[in-house]
Image (cartoon, rainbow, N blue to C red):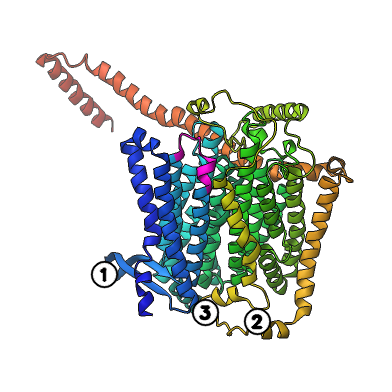
Amino acid sequence: MESIEPIYQYAWLVPVLPLVGAAIVGTGLISYSQTTSTLRRPSAVFIVSLTGAAMVLSFLIFFSQLNGHEAYTRTIDWASAGDFHLTMGYTIDHLASLMLVIVTTVAFLVMIYTDGYMAHDPGYVRFYSYLSLFSSSMLGLVISPNLLQIYVFWELVGMCSYLLIGFWYGRDGAADACQKAFITNRIGDFGLLLGMLALFWATGSFEFDVMGDRLTALVESGALTAGMASIFAILVFLGPVAKSAQFPLHVWLPDAMEGPTPISALIHAATMVAAGIFLVARMFPVFEDLPTVMTVVAWTGCFTAFMGASIAITQNDIKKGLAYSTMSQLGYMMMAMGVGAYGAGLFHLMTHAYFKAMLFLCSGSVIHGMEEVVGHDPVLAQDMRLMGGLRKYMPITSFTFLIGTLAICGIPPFAGFWSKDEILGSTFEVSPILWAVGWLTAGITAFYMFRMYFSTFEGQFRGTNKEIQTQLKREQLMAMGASLGPGAMNPQELTLDPEKEDDHGDHHHAEMPHESPFAMTFPLMALAVPSVLIGLVGTPFVNYFEAFIHPPEEVIEPLLPWSEAFADFEWSEFLIMGGSSVGIGLIGITLAVLMYARKTIDPAAIANQIKPLYQLSKNKWYIDEIYNTVFVQGCRNLAKQVLTIDIRIVDGIVNLAGFVTLITGEGLKYLENGRAQFYALIVFGAVLGLVLLSGVT
């Protein structure tokens, strides 16, 4: 224990190292902008090196926890007055050490990928400083020992996502998208703040275990009703609803595709969206004894999983399809948390982080290869209707995308199978209805992911087809004309700032797409390894993951040796549950093959037969339109009414008072002429009037 003590003492360096990189480079950009912007490669190497050091330290901490060392918490008094104490510090336990490894590995690989993807962007150095600040904020959140400190880093993560989604802020689409993400997350965060303060009022603590124990005791003693305690917990849950893109606060996630692809991989795979799942895991001592809250969490996740998958079916933009896929998979994790499958939800968080980061980076590689073919039109570069046949030109990208697709579809032995199957099995024990929705969603997931794969990498290349390009440009212009209101999605991936146009010279065109440089393909290959193998640590035969990650109060029996566990395992339940999830996945894959590979079924004909459902999916369940009408237009109409009241009544009263003062002043000035006789006459008249008045009364 003594030999590893320094590791824990210096664990605070994990978030501080990326923060130092962001601070130094950011200060250079503010103070010596032109000079720092020219130091592109040195800045990148500096920031990537610091992130790499944080990753190494994270692995050392993780292996220390894996070897059975006790959790370590170090705190200091941040503010105190009498009995009131607020502490800040850091905690290292099994969950924190696992999250440190996930965040640092994905962030490190995304930063390497960024060098190739953003090579010609004038904001290259600024992007690296934002990435480093974002990574630091997320790492600080992960090791926070209490809810108050988590809230501080929670807001920092939100600020960084605002900066990164709106990185190309010179374009209306990016500016609208980052504002939409910021406002939507503030709605959820306001609920989180209210719930956090309410729990502190009830329990007098921000510590997770203390809050859980005291809240349970208050409910059992009758000092606090179960309904009130549930309201407090659900308010806290609103934070994860927004951050992890759960219905109804999911609308920011697809619009966030306005940001460069590397940040899409970082935000939508391993970090920001995972923060909501992480917070639910941390709040598990509070949530688990409140059945109403667990039910709300489970059904929210279940509905979000189905909704995201149903929208992803009809998306033609490769990044938007992956965004709705992320929303759906986050729904699975939330559903697992709601049914009490703590380990299963976090297991899926880990496996999903790796294969979804790889899928997003693959989409960026595809866009990078397509942009010259379609004349640097950002919307066309992301449209799968102009792709096809890319496997011949981009073999590494296509192979890694296929691995990610098989993983997310839950095909054994890929990582997604083990985690998704564990979620479905745990859900079935609690609610067959929830399981049925999750099972159906698994089939839809397999269909839309292989639709994306076949449309992008198989068949004939359609990128040079002028007829399709003309049709898509016409659709693009019509969509822009019809959706200029708030919330409109107009992806501008790889569109450069005005001053950046010169960087491309004559904007030469290529006849065929090309494979991405090594800086972009290396992270794809590196992420493919855990996408295939990481699920093996959580097999139902010997579940190492469950033994390592489990609710704080749950006691786990020691694991049997692999040979004994394999021989004693009850295969019947696993084969039924696992077989059913693989079966529905194979049905989805078969449909995708028939529609998009063999083309024996016409998707357009089916869409015409079920046009209302097709339009519902295509238009994202009309949620954006509803929000625009109810909230955006509603707020504007309310503001107009308030303005009318302000002008006519409030200003009217003030103006009337001023007018009366002006008139009386004008009248009185004729009475003040400086003659004493006139003043005496006025006094005499007033006295006479009083006498007459008293005589009458």
| Circle 3 crowding by C-alpha within 10 Å: few under 14, some 14–19, many from 20 | few
Q: CA distance from mark 3 to mark 2?
A: 26 Å
Residue 88 in magenta?
no
* Percent of width and height locating residue 249: 59, 50
Which corner quadrant holds the N terminus? bottom left
Other residues around mark 2 within 10 Å, as few (<14) / some (14–19) / many (≥20): few
| Residue at image mark 2 | 562
Residue drawn where x is 62% and y is 76% of the image: 543
Quadrant position of residue 41: top left
Residue labelled with disc 1: 82
> Is residue 95 in view?
yes
Residue 231 is at least partly visible in this image: no
Work out which quarter of the rendered image holds the C terminus and state it. top left
Give coordinates of residue 684: x percent, y percent. Answer: 16, 21
Q: CA distance from mark 2 to mark 1?
A: 55 Å
Task: Look at the numbered disc 3 and give the secondary structure of its residue.
Answer: loop
Residue 281, given in percent of the width and then of the height, sits at: 53, 67
Q: Amino acid at mark 2?
A: Trp
Q: Nearer the viewer, mark 3 or mark 2?
A: 2
Indicate the amino acid at tag 3. Answer: Glu
Residue toward you, 387 or 290: 387
Per the model, the C-alpha gap separating discs 1 and 3 is: 32 Å
Considering the numbered disc 1 on the image, is that residue within a helix, a strand or a loop? Answer: loop
Q: In screen coordinates, is 123 left or right of 291?
A: left
User: Which residue sits at x=38%, y=53%?
Assistant: 19
Residue at numbered disc 3? 553
Please report whichever mark, 2 or 1, sits nearer to the chain's N-terminal start: 1
Indicate which label's residue lies in the foreground, 2 or 1.
2
- In the image, what residue occupies the spot 53% across and 56% down? 106
Is 653 situated left or right of 620 in this image?
left
Badge 2 marks a residue whose secondary structure is: helix
- Read off the magenta span: 113-124
